[in-house]
């Protein structure tokens, strides 16, 4: 589901909110897992910012300039549990069009509120930097895989919860 129209977006938000409130406190600690994911993403922020500062300003073909980026179900579930606010709608992107959140100084959206694909994607320049001696002690790809695994577990627990009752 892409939730492109405002009515589809509102319906998706209402449905998630309804189910999270309906099943709150029934032994499924979704909030704790979402908080753990938040902390892992926050810990990545300085590293991701440093990588972007070294690669993005001089890039002739920036990733954010040609994305097809969407919030997926895991993003929405995480955002609802995160409690930091919800986007007003699906991102306005399309093949060959710049992301609507791209500004002069990079992304205008807090990393916790972005679709996760905006964090896990590493361009070839960033991947090359990570092979550099300065970055070797920080296993960014492994940390990103941990977050992906936790997000998948969050979805699995939510589906089990809703399917159980």
Image (cartoon, rainbow, N blue to C red):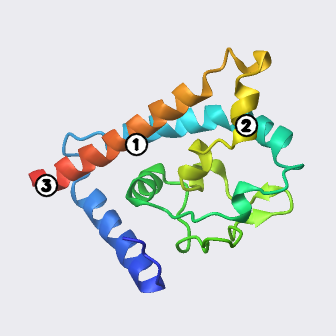
Could you tell me if the residues under marks 2 and 3 are in contact, i.e. CB atoms within 8 Å? no
Q: Earlier in the sequence, mark 1 or mark 3?
A: 1
Could you tell me if the residues under marks 1 and 3 are in contact, i.e. CB atoms within 8 Å? no
**Alpha carbon distance from label 1 to label 2:** 23 Å
Q: State which quarter of the image contains the C terminus.
A: bottom left
How many neighbours does mark 1 have within 10 angstroms: few (below 14), some (14-19), or many (20 or more)?
many
Say which of 56 and 159 sits in front.
56
Name the residue located 79 percent from the left edge and 18 percent from the top edge: 134
Say which of 48 and 7 sits in front.
48
Mark 2 residue element: helix
**Would residue 141 be found to the left or right of residue 134 on screen?**
left
Say which of 134 and 96 sits in front.
96
Report which residue position mark 3 lands on.
163
Q: Earlier in the sequence, mark 1 or mark 2?
A: 2
Q: Earlier in the sequence, mark 2 or mark 3?
A: 2
Q: Quadrant of residue 94?
A: bottom right
Q: Quadrant of residue 69?
A: bottom right
Question: x and y percent of residue 95 in the render?
Answer: 61, 71
Mark 3 residue element: helix
Question: x and y percent of residue 103 in the render?
Answer: 80, 64
Report which residue position mark 2 lands on.
126
Say which of 142 and 158 sits in front.
142
């Amino acid at each position: 589901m892409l939730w492109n129209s405002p009515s589809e977006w509102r319906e998706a938000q209402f449905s998630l909110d309804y189910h999270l409130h309906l099943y709150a406190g029934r032994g499924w600690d979704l909030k704790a897992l979402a908080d753990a994911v938040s902390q892992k993403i926050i810990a990545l922020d300085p590293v991701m910012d440093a990588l972007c500062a070294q690669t993005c300003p001089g890039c002739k073909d920036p990733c954010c300039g040609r994305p097809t980026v969407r919030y997926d179900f895991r993003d929405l579930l995480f955002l609802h549990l995160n409690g930091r606010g919800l986007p007003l709608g699906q991102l306005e992107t399309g093949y060959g069009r710049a992301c609507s959140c791209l500004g002069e100084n990079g992304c205008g959206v807090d990393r916790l509120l972005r679709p996760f694909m905006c964090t896990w994607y590493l361009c070839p320049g960033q991947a090359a930097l990570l092979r550099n001696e300065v970055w070797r002690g920080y296993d960014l790809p492994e940390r990103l895989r941990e977050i992906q695994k936790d997000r998948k577990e969050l979805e699995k627990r939510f589906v089990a919860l809703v399917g159980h009752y």
